[in-house]
Amino acid sequence: MEEMQVKRKTWYDKNAVKREFKDGDLVLVLATSRANKLAVQWIGPGTILNKISETNYLVEIPGRRETSQIYHINMLKPYYKRPEHVNASELNKHLHDKQMDRLRELLNKYSKCFSNNPGLTNLVEHEIQLVSDQPVRTKPYRMSHRQNEILKNEINRMLKLGIIEVGESDYMSPMILVEIAGKEPRPCIDYRKLNGIIRTEYFPLPNIEERVEKVSAAKFITVFDLSKGYWQIPLSKTAQRYAAFCTSFGTYRPLRMSFGLKNAPYFFSKLMAELLNGLEDFVVPYLDDIAIFSDTWESHIKHMETVLQRIKRAKLTIKPSKCKFAQQNVKFLGHIVGQGFRTPSEIKVQAVLEFPTPRTKTQIRAFLGIAGYYQKYINLFSVIAAPLTDALKGRAKKGEIKWTTECENAFRELKGKLIDKPVLYAPNFEREFIVQTDASNAGMGAVLTQLTEQGEEHPILYLSKKFSEVEKRYCTTEKECASIVFAIKRLHYYLDGNSFLVMTDHNPLVWLNRNVSSNPRLMRWALALQPYNFRIVHRSGKSHKNADSLCRSVIDN
C-alpha cells in the first residue's frame, strides 16, 4: 500500500515546480465570490506579509473585512503589475496621426519610467552633517484616536513602499499631522530641532524669469513630474540615524529623503543638475518639474528621448497623470507659456482678485507679494502700488494701517490690470530690442519690446520704480535720464552685446549719448552706459504710449 502511494506521488509530482513567495510580493487570492458563495474568483492584488510555513502565507488584502488572513499556496498566484498607462491621445489633438504614433512608440519604449511609485536614484545620496554632537530627542506628540489612525495608514504605506523601516536611534523627531481646512490631513515630521544643528548647504537658486522665457518661446513643450521626487533620493546610513522619527505607536528610520529636512531642496536641486547636465539648451527643471522645449517636432522627439534615457539610467520614475506631452501651451511656474508668449495662470490671478482689503501691514505685504509676482505684466507697477508701499512706512512691522482713498484706488487698479489678461512675448535674440522709457513726478517706467516680421510691436516685459525722496527733487531731464539708466541696467541680460534702440518722448535726451550736458550726474550716467551699443530716438508723446500711458493718469489720480 505504501509502495503504491509512493509511486502515485512520484507520478503526480513528476512535473511539479516548487512555488514560494517573498515578503512584499503581490499576489491574487482564490476566494469565494461575495455575490455567490458557491462560486470562486480571483481577488486582489494582496501583499504577502509573512511566510507561516512551507505552504501557508499571511496575506493582506485591502477592502476585505479581515484585512490579513492565512492562505494555502495553492490559493495564491503571482500578480504582475503592468507599467503605468500613459494616455497621450486626449492631450494632443493638435498632433496629426503620424506624430501621435511616433509619440506613443517613444512612450511605450520607456514605459517603465512611468509609475506612481517612487524610484530610487543612484545619482545623489542625502548626507547630513551636524554642527553639534548633542543628540536631539523629542517625545511623540499626543494625538486623538482619529489622528493616530491617519498616521498609522501613512506609516503602513511608507513601510510597503520601502520609504521607512522600523528602527531605533539616539536622535528622534516627532511625526505630526498638519490639518488645513478644505484639504486632506498631511502627515509630516517636525524636524525643527534637528534642523537647528544641521550644517546648511547652499545651491544657487534658479532664475524663474529666465526659465519661463525659455519655455514660452517654444512650439512644442513636454512637462515631466517626478513621482514623489524627494522619496527617490536615498539617505546615507548616518542621515538615517539623524532623521529617525517617532509616533505614539512606534519608532522608525527613514530610508529616503524626507520633507522638512533642512537641506532637502539643496540635494534635490543637485539631483536635477546631475541628471540634466549639458541639456540646458532644451530642458529646464524647477523642483520636481522638468520642462522640455523645442522649436520643431523632430527635435522635440529627440529631446524627449534624451531626457527619458537619463531618467531611466538614474532609476527615477515619472508620475503619468501629471505629464503633459508635446503641448502647444502648458502651465509652468504660475504662467501659461508656449508659442512665443506667456500670460498669468488663471488660478494665480484669481488668488489676487479674491484677496480681501488689507487692514494690516502684514496683509499689505502679502498682497504685494502675490501681485508682485506678475509685475512684469503691469506697466508702472511700482508707481501704481506707491500708496500701498507708503502705508508700510514706519518702525512697526505689524499693526493696523490707515487705509486711504489712494490705497483703495491702487489696490483696485492692480487687480484690474490682471483682469485684462495681459500677454508678454518671448524675446528673440536675433532681432533688435527696443527700450521705451518715461518718468513722472512719482516714478519711472520702461517697457522692453520687439518688432515682429509683420512690423507689429509686442511687449516682452515692463519695469517700474517709485522715486525716492532724493530722486523726486531731480529736474525733468535728470528724471528722464534716470529712467534710461534704470532700464538699461535692469535689462542687461537682454541688451548686453546687442545693438538696441532707446525711445523717449523727452527731446533733450536725444543728445545723452553725446554727453553735451554740463550736469555732473548726467555725465556719470553717460559714462556708465558707454559699454552698451544703443542709439536714442525721440518719439513724440502722442505715439509714446507703452511707457507713458499709465504714468500721467496715475499721477493725476
Image (cartoon, rainbow, N blue to C red):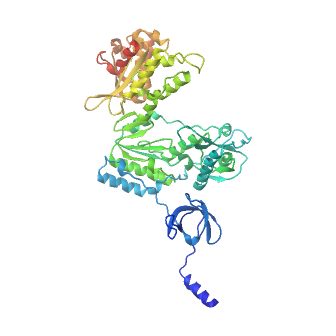
> In the shown orientation, is residue 7 left or right of residue 349?
right
Q: Position of residue 484 (x, y in %)?
A: 40, 19
The quarter in which the N terminus is drawn is bottom right
Task: Give the vertical position of 154 relative to 452 (above or below).
Answer: below
Between residue 381 and residue 74, name the one nearer to us: 74
How far across and down, in percent of the image, does residue 109 sit? 41, 57
Q: Nearer the viewer, residue 208 or 187?
A: 187
Which residue is at 45% across, 37% downward? Answer: 333
The residue at the far left in this view is 454
Q: Give the left or right position of residue 203, taking residue 299 as reference.
A: right
Q: Quadrant of residue 197?
A: top right
Q: Quadrant of the C terminus?
A: top left
User: Which image quarter: residue 514?
Assistant: top left
Depth check: 63 or 351 in front?
63
Q: Is residue 223 above or below residue 455?
A: below
Q: How many marks?
A: 0
Residue 374 in the image: above or below residue 170 = above
Q: Is residue 462 visible?
A: no
Q: Position of residue 513 (x, y in %)?
A: 37, 17
Q: Quick one: which residue is furthest to the right in this view?
A: 134
Expressed as whole percent of the image width and height from the top left, the position of residue 463 reads: 42, 24
Would residue 367 be visible to someone looking at this image? yes
Look at 33% across and 55% down and name the residue there: 101
448 versus 281 height, above or below: above
